[in-house]
Amino acid sequence: MLLLPWQEECGTRLGYNGPKGTFLVNITPKPKYIFEILANTLEQANKKYNVLIPWYIMTSNDNHEETIDFFEKHSYFNYPKNSISFFNQGQMPLLSESGNFLLDEKNLIQFAADGNGSIYRSMKQEGILKDMKKRNIEWIYICSVDNILLKMVEPTLVGLTISQGNEIASKTVAKKNPQEKVGVFCLKNGKPSVIEYSELPQDMAEATDENGNLLFGESHIMCNLFSLNALEKIANTSLPYHFAHKKAAFYENGTKIEPTTPNAYKLEAFIFDAFSQFENITLLRGKREEDFAPIKNKQGVDSPETAIKLYNALFSK
């Protein structure tokens, strides 16, 4: 079993100019980088279960070298260097609103990371799946880098998935309220799926059962488990691309243009689009205060302030 946190984008929503894993979090008793927190959690699991868990980190072309240099600078946070691997995710061209390619300073087509769903294809192309098979790895835990309460090893989730005869699983938390901006699990054409909050009609988002619980209340918090067989299957298929409307600087006649509003379309694949390739998925609901403290925004919801509060409350017990 191992972990693959992706960090394909720098922490722009954080107001931080760097890979999100290199963000310094002011937790108690001393500040730590997100990568440091995750490395410490992995090391604790290694000691508890008497194993050495391989750690694979997906980067983008924009932050690949910077991420490796960061680990070198910090001596890999005392985690065995030969048990940490870095690999690049894919890219797709950036398109203007009129459908033309955006160009860079060399008058070449601009590319951008193509979403967390490209992880499957990237693992195959970068030789990661072969490395996993060589190491006799059977289960792979894939998650986001920005959750500082992430449990790096979930024996309960693995055992439950095996007992149910499934090849994929996910850790969830109950959706806080109908307006919370998280994707939720559902069945689509009888197959497991996730629907984004922006695509869920208001009446469905607010629908409850006889006990007052949200009908669409299992949040997808980017904590997913796959068998190696499942990853190999997905890597040999194609996932749909979604258009994301974003701001992107570009060059026109040698002049750099810095837009103030979204001006470009980025093509992204989502990791949960692969779930529908399977008949069933195992879901294990955790506790928000123990499992989910994301750092996504500079202030307000899912900010360093809210994550630190959850982290300190849990580990001060």
Image (cartoon, helix red, strand yellow):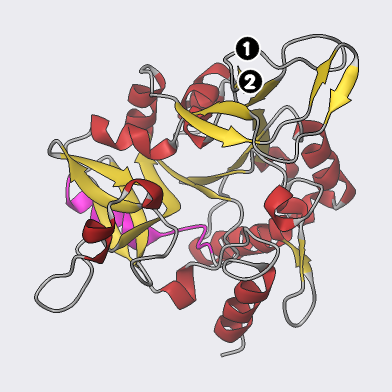
User: Relative to 275, is 51 on the left or the right?
Assistant: right
- What's the amino acid at mark 2? Ser
Within-10-Å neighbours for mark 2: few <14, some 14–19, many 20+: some
Q: Position of residue 264 (x, y in %)?
A: 63, 27
Q: Secondary structure at mark 2?
A: strand
For the point 57% across and 60% down, which residue is it? 147
- Name which quarter of the figure residue 125 lies in: top right
Instruction: Reply yes or no: does residue 157 show up in magenta.
Output: yes
**What residue is pinned by disc 1?**
100
Q: Are marks 2 and 1 in contact (CB under 8 Å)?
A: yes
User: Relative to 139, is 262 on the left or the right?
Assistant: right
User: In the depicted view, which residue is nearer to us: 76 or 198?
Assistant: 198
Q: Which residues are magenta?
A: 150-165
On the question of residue 104 being in view, the answer is yes
Q: Disc 2 versus disc 1: distance between alpha carbons?
A: 5 Å
For the point 56% across and 48% down, which residue is it? 53
- Name which quarter of the figure residue 128 lies in: top right
In the rendered structure, find residue 96 and report the number of the disc placed on it.
2
- What's the amino acid at mark 1? Asn
Q: Position of residue 33 (x, y in %)?
A: 76, 61
Q: Secondary structure at mark 1?
A: loop
Look at the image and tell me in which quarter the C terminus lies: bottom right
